[in-house]
Image (tube, rainbow, N blue to C red):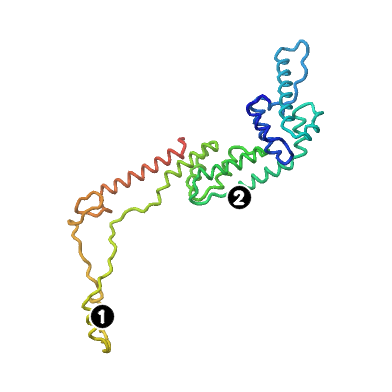
């Protein structure tokens, strides 16, 4: 084996149980050497004597690639399988026979990959890159073993695995139906994730928390003096006594926590409200730029 990738086949020879992995490695080598077309294209007919030169070149190229492919296949088999496939004349005949022998492994591997993808769900808080790598591995395994899944169906299957954190992204995609590869989708999802990563933080407020009243030392002394005596029955409180006087705050003395100027609270500060409005507009514009394709 002259290919620099042939070491893959040397270290992973076909033994029977590893057919799917062996086939994957074989296709890597044949694609690199540009011989894989003989597995799908039949041998060209023998051209007539007066046929153009390109017909002879095409036939010679096919024969050379077929011979190379058979050598790669047989050299990466165990001795038992080599003996079984000595009579075959084309690489395709050898592969078809192996598919009949171990085809159930391929079907089972394809079924397991699709089933695993359908049951896979992203947990809330899991990074989208880690989740997408798992999803792409399932899709690759299914396609390697014969599953034909178009790009649109792949995107639908991916969206079904996402958590509710990406509902807004999915809604935007459904409106625009932008075509993209899985790699492009992962980048878009990562951009969406970065935008909304800190959106759950709470805004600051100027509301003061009520403080609990300090204990009255005189009250404790009175309790000590009256120890042993019957407790006096308090007269029912009137409506006036139950009402607590609210402390009036002079607006002119109030200092804003945002701009530092006196005369207003932070919630009424024009600079603060303008800043929030600009920030909201920026987030919306940036999100639309990432997710919405201009019509």
Q: Which residue is mark 1?
A: 237
Instruction: List the single residue furthest toward the bottom.
Output: 229
> Is residue 114 found left or right of 194 in the rendered image?
right
Asked whether 156 or 129 is in front, the reply is 129
- Which numbered dot is residue 20? none
Kindly indicate the quadrant of the structure image that contains residue 238. Answer: bottom left
Name the image quarter holding the N terminus: top right
Neighbour tally class for label 2: few under 14, some 14-19, many 20 plus, Cα within 10 Å: few
> Is residue 46 found left or right of 34 in the rendered image?
right
Asked whether 108 or 69 is in front, the reply is 69
CA–CA distance in space, label 1 to label 2 = 66 Å
- Between disc 1 and disc 2, the foreground one is 2
Sequence-first tag of 1 and 2 = 2
Kindly indicate the quadrant of the structure image that contains residue 79. Answer: top right
Q: Position of residue 282 (x, y in %)?
A: 36, 42
Q: Position of residue 75 (x, y in %)?
A: 73, 29
Q: Which residue is mark 2?
A: 119
Is residue 36 depicted above or below 290 in this figure?
above
> Is residue 233 found left or right of 182 in the rendered image?
left
Is residue 162 depicted above or below 74 in this figure?
below
Neighbour tally class for label 1: few under 14, some 14-19, many 20 plus, Cα within 10 Å: few
Which residue is at a point 51% across and 40% down the rendered structure image? 186
Asked whether 152 or 82 is in front, the reply is 82
Asked whether 268 or 117 is in front, the reply is 117
SS of the residue under disc 1: loop
Instruction: List the single residue furthest toward the top.
Output: 50
SS of the residue under disc 2: helix
Which residue is at a point 38% across and 43% down the rendered structure image? 283
All told, the count of numbered labels is 2
Q: Position of residue 126 (x, y in %)?
A: 50, 49
């Amino acid at each position: 084996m002259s290919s620099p990738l042939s070491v893959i086949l040397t270290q992973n020879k076909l033994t029977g149980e590893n057919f799917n992995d062996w086939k994957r490695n074989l296709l890597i080598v044949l694609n690199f050497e540009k011989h894989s077309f003989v597995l799908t294209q039949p041998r060209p007919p023998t051209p007539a004597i007066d046929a153009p030169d390109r017909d002879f070149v095409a036939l010679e190229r096919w024969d050379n690639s077929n011979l190379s492919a058979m050598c790669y296949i047989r050299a990466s088999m165990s001795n038992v399988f080599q003996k079984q496939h000595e009579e075959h004349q084309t690489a395709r005949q050898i592969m078809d026979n192996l598919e009949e022998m171990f085809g159930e492994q391929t079907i089972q591997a394809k079924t397991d990959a699709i089933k695993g993808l359908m049951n896979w769900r992203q947990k809330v808080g899991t990074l989208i890159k880690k989740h997408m790598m798992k999803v792409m591995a399932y899709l690759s395994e299914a396609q390697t073993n014969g599953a034909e899944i178009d790009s649109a169906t792949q995107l639908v299957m991916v969206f079904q695995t996402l958590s509710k954190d990406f509902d807004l992204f999915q809604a935007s995609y459904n409106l625009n139906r932008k075509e993209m590869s899985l790699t492009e989708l992962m980048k878009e999802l990562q951009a969406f994730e970065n935008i909304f990563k800190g959106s759950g933080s709470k805004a600051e407020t100027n509301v003061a928390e009520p403080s609990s009243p300090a204990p009255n030392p005189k009250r404790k002394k009175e309790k000590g003096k009256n120890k042993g005596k019957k407790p006096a029955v308090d007269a029912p409180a009137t409506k006036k006594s139950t009402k607590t006087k609210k402390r009036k705050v002079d607006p002119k003395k109030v200092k804003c926590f945002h701009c530092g100027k006196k005369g207003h609270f932070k919630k009424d500060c024009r600079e603060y409200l303008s800043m929030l409005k600009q920030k909201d507009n920026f987030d919306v514009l940036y999100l639309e730029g990432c997710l919405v394709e201009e019509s």
